[in-house]
Amino acid sequence: RWPFFRGHRSNSSNKLLPKVIVPAVFEEYSSQKVLVTEWIDGIPLAQAPKEQIRELIPVGVELFLCQLLDIGRFHADPHPGNL
């Protein structure tokens, strides 16, 4: 059902974006309109130190371009609560 996420789970093969974690998809609870993924603990981007945000900006840009140009699908709601 979500073939564009298959193979994007492992971070070890991703040399360009080693800090990116793609959550596991729970296909049994997902549908064409709802994607259910695992919860990943972290801090909201808005609460991160400014230095860390500056480091993450190029990662976010590269990730968005990778999603758009390589995978052909992208996160359509990338507000700080979703990043």
Image: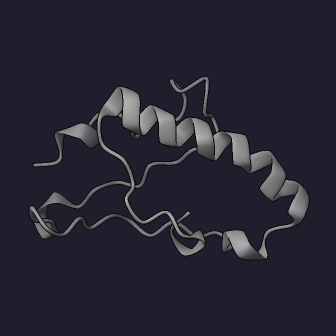
Q: Is residue 28 left or right of residue 45?
A: left
Front one among 28 and 79: 79
Front one among 63 and 35: 63
81, above or below 63, in the image:
below
Q: Residue at x 40, y 40 (%)?
A: 9
Spot occupied by residue 77 in the image (x, y as percentages of width and height): 42, 66
- The quarter holding residue 49 reads bottom right
Spot occupied by residue 39 in the image (x, y as percentages of width and height): 44, 70
Q: Residue at x 36, y 47 (%)?
A: 74
Spot occupied by residue 31 in the image (x, y as percentages of width and height): 10, 65
Q: Is residue 47 left or right of residue 24?
A: right
Instruction: Please say which color scheme the image uses.
Output: one colour
34, above or below 12, in the image:
below
Q: Is residue 61 left or right of residue 9?
A: right
72, above or below 56, in the image:
above
Spot occupied by residue 3 in the image (x, y as percentages of width and height): 17, 39
Front one among 79 and 9: 79
